[in-house]
Amino acid sequence: MIKGFFAKHLQETLQISKRTLYREISSIEKTIKPQKAQIINERKNGYRLIGEKETLQAIRQEVENNQEVVFDNVHRQSALVSSLLLAEEEMIIEGLAQDFAVSPATIHSDLLQVEKSLSEYGLSLQRKKARGILVTGSEEKRRQILSNIIYSDVNEYEFFSYLSELNAADKNIRSTNFFLNFISPIWFYFAQKAVLEKTNSLFIEVTDNQLQQVITSLALSLERINKGHFLTETTSNQTVSPSIRSLAEQIIGEIKRQTDLGMTEAEILFFSKQLEGVNYKKPQNIFLDNFDAELSYQVRELIRLVSEQMQKDFRKDDTLFYDLLTHLSAAFKRIDNQAQLAGNPLLEKILEEYPELTEIIQANLKQIFTDHQAFLQDELAYIVIHFAASLERNPVRKELSALVLCSSGIGTAKILESRINKYIPEIERIEIAKISQMSHIDFKEFDLILSTIYLPEFSLPYKVISPLLLDDEIYEIKQELKGKQSENKPASFASAPKTTQNDFEKVYEQMKVANELLTRFSIKNITTQQTLEKTLEVILEELEGVVLENRRKVRDLIVNRHQLAPIGIPNTHFALFHSSNHYVKEPYFAIFDLSRSVPILGMDKKPMELTRLLLMLAPADMSETENRLLGKISASVIESDVNMQLYQYGNEEEIYEWISSLFIAEIKESEEE
């Protein structure tokens, strides 16, 4: 049986009172009675419309044909801005009033607000006597504002459902969403094909809302190019990383193969900057050229300060660190590229749910990230989500399976998953899925389907819940699960996992690499030479022929990496010098105490005196084990104040014991994977 809608859900969706709801239902019943259809209200299934299939289809068609878009003030102004930005010629006040079903006086009032908003982005609203109104200014800013408006006024489920209906042959398909129709369906089709089908593996970890932003921005650019509106140059001075540039060229290459549009250098650069704001799950490896040591330190500082002020040690949560590092790396690009959008009610609710955490994080963001004072409200909320998810982590024993369809991003999904784990222990397996993945899910595998947004026309039973999983929702889910628990068969006893030859070889490889690194580790005194380069050459000289070949080449690579970004640890007198290259034969880590200090820059861009030099080397083609063990050492250096004190003042025996414990923990963790 198809599940209906309860009165409470209808009230929340329509934003009306119970009294108004009953009055409207009564009115609808009178309207559909001659068509031999009726509304029924079943105790456990809610309101449903019943009738012959042909009758229901006719009612649906009539509703769709006569549907009139009604805007509130905020959405009307967004629609007005979009219409003006896309207009090819002047628009008349009376015509706009008719389009939006309001008075000319209301349009005049809206235009005052619109004009103020546009001026903040260097765009002007020109009023031409006896001709009308026209927006003038940068094509780049015009696209940024348009794509942000279209993105913010379309939810993820609606967006990806619309994309799934598109094909190259049908160019006239229309969406019921007013804002989606600003872009021709053919350009949405080509954009999603280039991004999702040809480069799908590159976007596996990207959230639905960010995929939506990328596809919307690309489709809008194709629409504008097709109408003859080209970018001649971009106004931003922001540089783009080579990896992102390469990804942009790959996607644009697909567009060129599918269409005859001319994609200029300025268009590729503009799209590259849109991709820079995406949270790719980039490997956080200290040996990578694009590893941001400064940001890594700043994130550790943020976690340390929040830990102290919240009296909750977040520093033990590696997931929090890496998720924040990934998020903030992309967030700074988004702040540069996006216009301020209207507040997201869901994110605002999260800030209200964690007021103390929000206040502490906000204050420390301003203290640490002095170059980025203007954090958007949404960005602040996502950072709060990462910390809140860490607070909620508490895995427990469970018995049933649940699918959670979540559209708000990985951080929100983690809060929800953690709260389900904590408060509904009956659920054994939780799978979080994005709205864009729904067509690939076998829903029969799950005892329960939960969604953070309403899913129009989704035929299977599901429950709409808040990402915060409120108390009444927990109670309702528990009640629903009581009947399902008796349907499950007792789990059979599984045999103990067998240790295979591959498992043994893996452990042996890890132990072998760990032992070699510990055997080579030492702390030595070195006489400081006239320059840092010459001091490094003295250090590398005794490693030549054993750990490395050609000490001068290795020295130059280390120095170049050091000059690329500061590596000194702030508030200490040591730095981690590192390089991975073809001249290094074996992984290596050691510490060298200098006879006199050398001036260098710290990760915080402040000058410091170097007295202890940490050196880490690795082959260019190092194994996964070598990568993981060396990564464990590098991550531990700035993990906490205690660790920094240990690496700055610890003797050989103390640091040897510490590294040994890191390796043991890492090997045990890999055995459990």
Image (tube, helix red, strand yellow):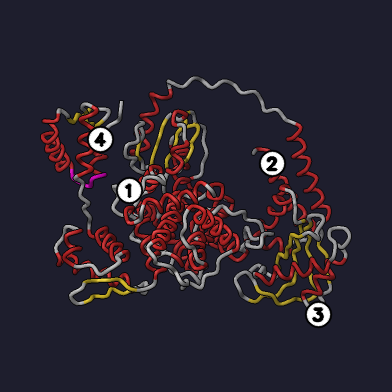
Residue 493 placement (x, y as % from top left): 59, 21
Name the N-terminal-most of marks 3 and 4. Answer: 4
Secondary structure state at the residue bearing disc 3:
loop
Distance in Å between CA atoms under marks 3 and 4: 79 Å
Circle 2 packing at 10 Å, graded few (<14), some (14-19), many (20+), is few
Say if mark 2 contacts mark 1, CB within 8 Å.
no
Range drawn in magenta: 13-17
Q: Which residue is mark 4?
A: 6
Name the N-terminal-most of marks 2 and 1. Answer: 1
Residue 308 placement (x, y as % from top left): 53, 59
Judging depth in this view, the residue of 372 and 397 nearest the camera is 372
- Visible in this render: residue 332? no
Distance in Å between CA atoms under marks 2 and 4: 50 Å
Name the N-terminal-most of marks 2 and 4. Answer: 4
Residue at 17% over, 29% down: 37
Please give left or right for residue 134 compared with residue 662 in the image: left
Name the N-terminal-most of marks 3 and 2. Answer: 3
Residue at 61% over, 23% down: 494
Q: Which residue is mark 2?
A: 668
Q: Amino acid at mark 4?
A: Phe
Residue 256 placement (x, y as % from top left): 51, 56
Q: Which residue is mark 1?
A: 172
Q: Is residue 16 magenta?
A: yes
Give the number of the mark in front: 2 or 1. 1
Q: Amino acid at mark 1?
A: Asn
Distance in Å between CA atoms under marks 3 and 2: 45 Å
Q: Amino acid at mark 3?
A: Gln
